[in-house]
Amino acid sequence: MSEEVNSKALTGRKIEWAENTPAALAAHKEINGPIIRTRFPPEPNGYLHIGHAKSMNMNFSLAFEKLGVAPENRRTVFRYDDTNPEAETEEYIDSLRRDLQWLGWTPEKTTYSSDNFQALYDYAVVLIKKGLAYVCDMTKGEVEIQRELAMQRVNAKNKGLDPDEVAPIPSPDILPGRSRNTSVERNLKLFDNMRMGMYNEGKYTLRLKMDFESSNPNMYDLVAYRIKYTRHPHAGNGWCIYPSYDWTHGTCDSLEHIDYSICTLEFETRREPYFWILWALDLYKPQVYEMSRLNIEYTVLSKRRLIKLVNNNFVRGWDDPRMPTISGLRRRGYTKDILNSFCNDVGATRAMNVVEMEKLFQSARSKLSATSRRAMAALDPIKVTITNFEDEVAKKKAVGEEITYEVQNSPTDEAMGSHTVTLTDVVYIDSSDFRMKDDSTYYGLAPNKAVGLKYFGGNLVCDEVVATNADGNATELKCRLDSSDDRQKPKSWITWVPKNGIPCEVRVYGHLFAVPEPSDRWEEELNDKSEMIYAKAIVDPSVKEYVDAKHVDKWTSNPALQFERIGYFAVDVDTAYESGTNEGALVFNRTVSLKEETFKKKLTEEEIAKIEARKAKTKADLETKEAKMQVSAEDLFKLAPEYKGVYSKFNDEGIPTHMVDGSEVSKSAMKKLAKDQKKHQKALASWAKQQK
């Protein structure tokens, strides 16, 4: 470390190769001085999501707080981990930079892994000369067989069995591999030819000569370079071989003098290769800390799944307001303060958990309540003609009152100013404020019933339903105002929009998925009601200038409003409204509902109990799945919760041969269990991919 810090705050599993020599520590201290440096290294193969927001919060702020680093000594590098040109684009590169900037983080510098391509290549040559890397001609299928065989032999050895009996090596061409012990001269020549573009893709790879006897499969001679004839979006056409993630990220960490390399827990098993590579190159070794990834209800954060959502047109794009991307959340109306506050509240630990979506909603409400301008709107408007409008206006004027009302833009912050709204002979109310049939628990408007009309200081009484739609719901009413001294005291006050209100489209968003924890069949679990469009909504005209399209941009937080008694809304980028001409589409997205919505259904104790039971079951199912994903295929029937204590004896592959009572397991049952073991093996591989 370059400064005395609370290094125990960010510690992980110790590795024998992870210790720096006194000389390396001294050289690092001379370069960094009192500075403590972290890095944020996303791959530009998609848009950043809320999980990346958590990582940014950790690397730019929370890590330093945990370590006790003085503000003037904090530095964070923003690095594009751009080693896979087939998946990376200039669009993604630009979006990452803009999202980082919008969230308010200022990096010490911006770097690209590809800027180190020459250095990474030179280091590969160093390892070839040391006899620690070789050019391999094994096919993908052969490598899979090799790795599986190595794992079987290690498992046998760990159980005290003879690996040559349990998993004999059929040929040295498979293990250790026909290319592993070839000459330095041969490997230097082939690697240079790879660099010169003399071979087809897949013909050769450069692999690291690591350890086939390790219990960690990530030590089974990882690939450091592969041939790809793809133009790089940042480096251009200069390279046809590209370094792997494992070869690149630790080396770049060392070259950039990183003190703490922070990643998520699925990379914990990459500690061995991370430190082995730096050990082999005799480079400085940063501290590595793994934290739990962000899991949040009713969405997915796997980039593969997000790409599929976009490519299969399940959503409007990367910035769809239902997406958990930074761009989608910003478009929906979430501000940087909301997201950073949420990440602070979630924190960073090694404990796996699923965060309730309501936690994010509450962060939004607490921020938007203090900053959002108020306005009245009707999403599904009912036309109301006030039959005694002229009489009421005359009555008001007779006592020196007007029907134009000054309304504070914020009830808690006078500095936000005010606006006016004028009552007209025709107004619009939201359909949620009217019912054809009244009952004792309903406080809204109904035929022959009075409610308070907000800001008017009197009641609105429904005398006649003029028109209904095909579903029998009212679309037009005739009502009268009542400001008499002996009028009935209303139980509620409803909002309204004058006849010169601005027509608009309002998009109300719900959860993207219908279940809290999407499964492997996630495409079937999408919520078909995640977007409800109110195409004929109307908003009061006081917002005219505020919502002009000139104030709207996809890379900034757009004008936000609280529609009184409805929720928080933001102007959408599809808006083309011009306040000068009062023309062009005006579109709003609902960010989040109000904390306490009027006329919200009251749940019975039985309904509440069912909801709590579902939550408990979801949590229990997740915990069971996570526990099972920690069990290897060989130990499935010994350690998995559903099998524990069922069987007493097992064969070398881990398949049960005897029940706990000593009776033999039938051959047909063993075949079925073998299939279950293979399914579990596939599930483990799928789980590992989902965590990336």
Image: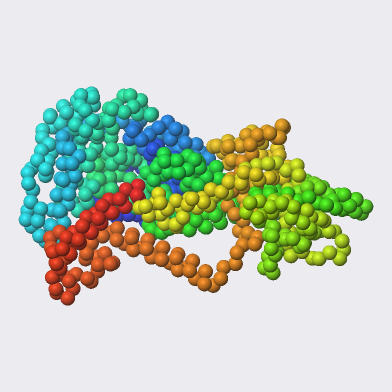
Residue pictured at 72% horizontal, 56% vertical: 494
Judge whether residue 479 can be spotted in this image: yes
Residue pictured at 70% horizontal, 65% vertical: 438
**Image quadrant assignment for residue 502:** top right
The total of numbered circles placed on residues is 0
Image x and y of residue 681, in percent: 24, 54
Image x and y of residue 466, in percent: 74, 52
Residue pictured at 23% horizontal, 47% vertical: 218
Seen in the picture, residue 386 relative to 205 is either above or below; the reply is below
Residue pictured at 52% horizontal, 45% vertical: 321
Most extreme residue toward the right is: 398
Seen in the picture, residue 122 relative to 472 is either above or below; the reply is above
Left or right: 376 as drawn, with respect to 488: left
Q: Nearer the viewer, residue 3 or 298?
A: 298
Q: Nearer the viewer, residue 171 or 113?
A: 171
Image x and y of residue 637, in percent: 22, 64
Left or right: 686 as drawn, with respect to 480: left
Judge whether residue 9 can be spotted in this image: no
In this picture the colour scheme is rainbow
**Image quadrant assignment for residue 684:** bottom left
Image x and y of residue 187, in percent: 15, 31
Most extreme residue toward the front is: 470
Left or right: 138 as drawn, with respect to 321: left
Q: Nearer the viewer, residue 260 or 640?
A: 640
